[in-house]
Image: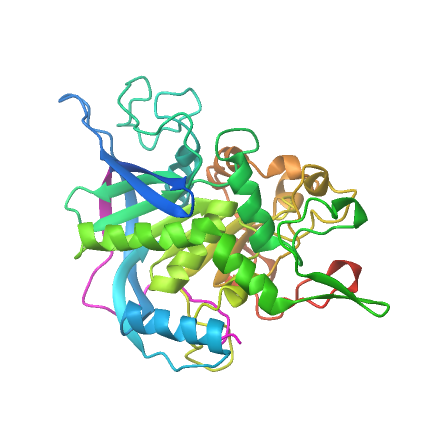
Amino acid sequence: MHIPVLASLSILPVASAFPPRLLQFDLSHQFAARSQDTDQTHLFSDYAFPQHFHPTLSLKAVPTTVYRPSSYEALQHARWRSIHQAQSEPVEWIETQVLGPDITDRHTLAQLARMTANAYQLPWKDSWYELDPSWNVNTSFPFGWDNDEDGFRGFVFRSRDNSTVVLSIKGTTLQGPTSKKDKLNDNLLFSCCCARVDFSWVFSTVCDCYDWFGLHRRCDDPCLSAALIEDSLFYSAGVRLVNDLRFLFPHADIWLVGHSLGGSLASLLGSTFGLPAVAFEAPGERMAAHRLHLPLPPSPTRVGLSHVPVTHIFHNADPIPQGACTGIASLCAQAGYALETRCHLGQTIVYDTVTRLGWHTDVGRHPIKELVLNVLELEGPWPDGQEGEREVPTPREEVDCVVGIPFNLSCIS
């Protein structure tokens, strides 16, 4: 049994005693989570920059209203009761004001996307993205990950005054040390039923929850929840990492960002802790939130989705966040991924690259560099439906989204 309604938050300026701010960020930590049997070891390490090297980037922060559980222990107890006893337990949500990213500012979104892209590679690689004119991509400095690392990865950036920390989470790597576990988490979180696209996948599913009942196919939802909770290591690792950051920076605002799988994890973690999250080109994670039994705050209006501080950013030529890279003939399935969900938590900002740039739907448009260089950093207005044109399209909730289910399986959104 899921606890409250699934949902969204509008990360918009609100009346506050805190004025908008321009934050200066430094690269603070790298992190990785190494799996040893069922345990996760978190690897945080500081950077020692040369005295003449001061990398920084500037982001706009605005007052943002979030809802947080009265205690994380109470939230975990409600989740445990839902998982093990199929019973709902009320969670007290506290309205809190924090400084969150200004999602109406193109430069801020572009810089957050560059932070996200940098979670994929070492800082001295050619593919490292400059985060401001003050960054020096030719400078080398220790990175700290083992070459054979196979866990949850990313970077931690913090503002000069330690008032704000940004956790950037790596998405799926197709070929590399993390690829196997990336694919496991992708298929557990985003497939309708154990990544079973058709009979050709019978020996390569990620769980055993699919069954025939007479002439009908069905999926055991409690079984799927158990598989997610037991096997989806990245969400659990992320919870511990966020707790580590809350301990290290008890008075800081914490933001979460990520791309693709990393974006969905950022959203799930932001929803868990009531932390502002910006997810780039992420598959729909609303079904995963249900199956993980995440307690979510109700909508303040009782009409919209849950009030979670999550904003999804993608363009309409990318099939993955739209749940359109599905079926055995799709490139996703042929690569071993069943990315069958499309409903997102929070709100979405969709860039109409089909109209403005003439792009066609193509999974080759999914890499983060396409969004950074050809969309977010492209000057000029974007089509915005009935709103006309805007530099950043209007954030909207996916209130009417219903998951498309292949093969008539009965899955929830």
Look at the image and tell me whether residue 10 can be seen. yes
Q: Main secondary structure of the magenta part?
A: loop
The total of numbered circles placed on residues is 0
Q: Residue visible at 51% across and 41% down?
A: 181
- Compared with 352, 291 (above or below) is below
Toward the viewer: 337 or 126?
337
Toward the viewer: 188 or 159?
188
Q: Is residue 273 left or right of residue 410?
A: left
Q: Is residue 12 magenta?
A: yes
Q: Residue visible at 18% across and 27% down?
A: 48
Q: Is residue 233 left or right of residue 53?
A: right
- Compared with 176, 282 (above or below) is below
Which residue extends farthest front? 37
- Compared with 100, 42 (above or below) is above
Q: Quadrant of residue 295?
A: bottom left
- Give the quarter of the figure containing the C terminus: bottom right
Residue 183: image location, x then y, percent: 57, 42
Residue 218: image location, x then y, percent: 74, 66
The magenta span reads 1-26
Q: Is residue 206 magenta?
A: no
Which residue extends farthest right? 215
Q: Is residue 204 left or right of residue 241?
A: right
Toward the viewer: 348 or 406?
406
Look at the image and tell me whether residue 4 can be seen. no
Toward the viewer: 106 or 401?
401
Residue 19: image location, x then y, percent: 21, 60
